[in-house]
Amino acid sequence: MQLIDLKAQQNRLQPALNKRILSVLDQGNYIMGEEVFHLESRLADYVGTKHVITCANGTDALHISLMALDVKAHDIVITTAFSFFATAEVIRLVNATPYFVDIDERTFNMCPTSLSNAIKHIVESGQGKISAVISVDLFGLPADHVALQKICHQYNIPLVEDAAQGFGGRIGDARAGTFGEIATTSFFPAKPLGCYGDGGAIFTDNDRIAEMCRSIRSHGMGNHKYENVRIGMNSRLDTIQAAVLLEKLTIFDDECLTRSENASLYSDNLDKSYVTPTLPDGFFSSWAQFTLWNRNVSRSEITQALQRKNIPFAIYYPVPINEQKGMIGCRGHKTPTAHNMSKKVFSIPVHPYLTDDDKGLIIETLNECCR
Ligand SMILES: *Cc1c(COP(=O)(O)O)cnc(C)c1O
């Protein structure tokens, strides 16, 4: 059993996958070949944004977004304490100051009340300019973007949606990737939509921001390749990776559906002492991870039982970002919920290639821990 089974997925996609890769090799346009533009237009249709700009990885997608929003040195950027390090790392990369807020215990996503209190506190105490808020769709579940957007609009602060894990999720008919002024995703192999290397994308409806992002991903390019009008970076998606993603998109909705059926099976059959993921009304998760904790039994006891049965698991995340050594000097209020959850949660396989036996063993092993 694998936590994410890329081999089973690859077997399902053959031989069409090979054909697409070989076609790139035949044409030899390894950088910015036609597959890249084809993929950008497919992603724009899928998510429902005007522009999609692919790039080298999900971290660069966030970094480019902050540059495009003109976040300046010493500006404050507010984000959640419970995410992958990259979400806040990019704030430091533009020399701005990360300011952390707490999460909602039920969804693991940014708590709107915590955001609103933080903004009030920063504004009232004149601590500096808040130039962006980065929300995260953790484990595949969109953040409470209705509430978050309302707060950001009220203070005229642009929202950046980090949908690295959320791609494929939605709130009603609105897909992850549409909730901020800019949204980003990652095509790292283990993400809901992954390629065979690194990859990322930026989503926006804003023409000016899209033009900035396109320029920044190619060395601050102007009207042609050797006109450089600003400082940018080298952050493009390889043509071969675009070809892989085009093929994977054909089964993506079906995979999301199976993950969601697996998630329901777990939630329905696990002992009631497990706290399984909450799906607020109208929210759909892409189920990047199935993350849970137990009210009575310690995490180490449970993970030892999983280990004995060779069931893979992961701990996302053992340390909140604001407690990481690399974030010394960051700001924000205390984030007790993020801290508490980081000591309790663990993630089990939910991928679409699990057999009934796999799922049965996982449920049985977890339930035995409670007896
Ligand atoms: C994976 C991830 C990133 C970074 O994406 P990379 O493609 O690995 O650079 C950023 N934010 C979140 C929430 C992630 O899960």
Image (cartoon, grey):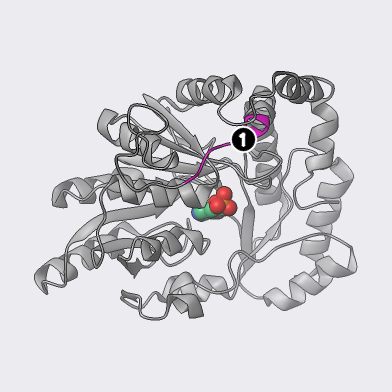
Q: Residue at x 51, y 75 (%)?
A: 340
Q: Between residues 269 and 354, which one lies in front from this camera angle?
A: 354
As for residue 135 lying within the magenta part, the answer is no
Q: Ligand 1 within 8 A of label 1's CB? A: no
Report x, y in % for residue 124. 10, 70
- Which residue is identified by label 1? 238
Above or below residue 40? Residue 72 is below
Residue 278 appearing in the image: no
Other-residue count near label 1 (Cα within 10 Å), few / some / many at <14 / 14–19 / ≥20: many
Q: Is residue 237 left or right of residue 89?
A: right
Magenta: main secondary structure: loop
Pick the quarter of the image with the C terminus.
bottom right
Name the kind of residue labelled 1 in the image.
Asp
Q: Which residues are magenta?
A: 234-241
Q: Secondary structure at mark 1?
A: loop
Q: Residue at x 45, y 24 (%)?
A: 44
Residue 96 appearing in the image: yes
Q: Is residue 3 left or right of residue 15?
A: left
Q: Residue at x 35, y 75 (%)?
A: 330
Q: Is residue 262 left or right of residue 193?
A: right
Report x, y in % for residue 323. 47, 78
Above or below residue 208? Residue 65 is below
Report x, y in % for residue 290. 64, 52
